[in-house]
Image (tube, rainbow, N blue to C red):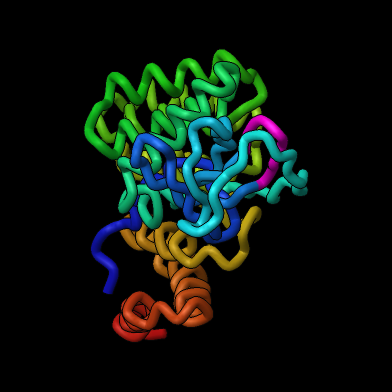
Amino acid sequence: MFKTLFMTCFFLVFIAAIIPAETIKLKNGQIVEGKIIERTDKYLKVDLYGASVVYYLEEIDKIDESQTVDSEKPAKSLTPTDIESQNEMIINSAAANLDKATFAFNKAISADPDNAVAYNNMGVISAKAGNFQEALNYYKKAAEMKSDYADPYNNMGALYCSLGNNEVAIDSYSKALAIDSNNKPTNYNLANLYAFKKDNENAIFYYQKVIEIDPDFAKAYANIGIILDSLGRKEEAKEYFTKAAEKFRLHNDLENAVKAENWLSLNGH
């Protein structure tokens, strides 16, 4: 049976939708693994973890450890790769490659000082490394550079929340939702924060908003069920635990599906 809420905070960061395909050896010995998205007679543009990084041909020794680069020979121009947002990249991808990701995003900022996405991504990397003030500075810079960019505000909220500054976290999440009211991770983060504060009305409101955005998001159903159960509203909780069990099984999360089903069984359903 469920005893605690699902309270994971989501950090938002851009990564490439594909696995890097080329290995590039620089003349300084640095090895870069990424997808070449543009070639000119002066430089290569490489997609590294969602950051477009420029390498001038005079910096490059070989590509794929077999093709020596001729800086005098014009090269073919390629269509840029589509880049999509992945809400949990910092946990699943860049977290395992902090040095590579840091190198990529710093390179992107050097090539394009107005790259708000790269600043946001550097903030996520800094937060993961425990450099919280540095992360906050990156998020603020990204938000200042691109006023319609919600991700830095979500990430500031998650950072403030992890540091126990809940009121500032709520303000940051609210700013993110003012830009993008249908941002699922931000709505879920804000719901979790209200649940932590025992503000059950607002917590349920934002969990329900998550369900509107993603009707298959099992944890939102489960968390509403847990809150309703704690309030003694068991008939209403039954509806949400039933849905939670269904959605957990849909995603092959059998452990949590069984917990929801056990609650239903213990409460005569």
Q: Residue at (38%, 82%) from the top-left corner?
A: 254
Give the magenta range.
Answer: 37-44
In the image, is 267 to the left or to the right of 173?
left
Q: Position of residue 76 (x, y in %)?
A: 76, 46
* Quadrant for the N terminus in the image: bottom left
Q: Main secondary structure of the magenta part?
A: strand
Check residue 86 for magenta coloring. no
Seen from the viewer's position, the closer of residues 11 and 182 is 11
Q: Position of residue 116 (x, y in %)?
A: 56, 24
Picture layout, residue 98 above or below residue 168: below
Q: Residue at (69%, 50%) from the top-left corner?
A: 81
Q: Position of residue 59 (x, y in %)?
A: 49, 32
Picture layout, residue 103 above or below residue 188: above
Picture layout, residue 265 above or below residue 114: below
Q: Position of residue 251 (x, y in %)?
A: 49, 76
Q: Quadrant of residue 196?
A: top left
Q: Residue at (50%, 59%) from the top-left corner?
A: 66
In the image, is 26 to the left or to the right of 180?
left
Picture layout, residue 165 above or below residue 250: above
Check residue 43 for magenta coloring. yes
Seen from the viewer's position, the closer of residues 25 and 153 is 25
- Residue 54 appears in view: no
In the image, is 11 to the left or to the right of 143?
left
* Quadrant for the C terminus in the image: bottom left
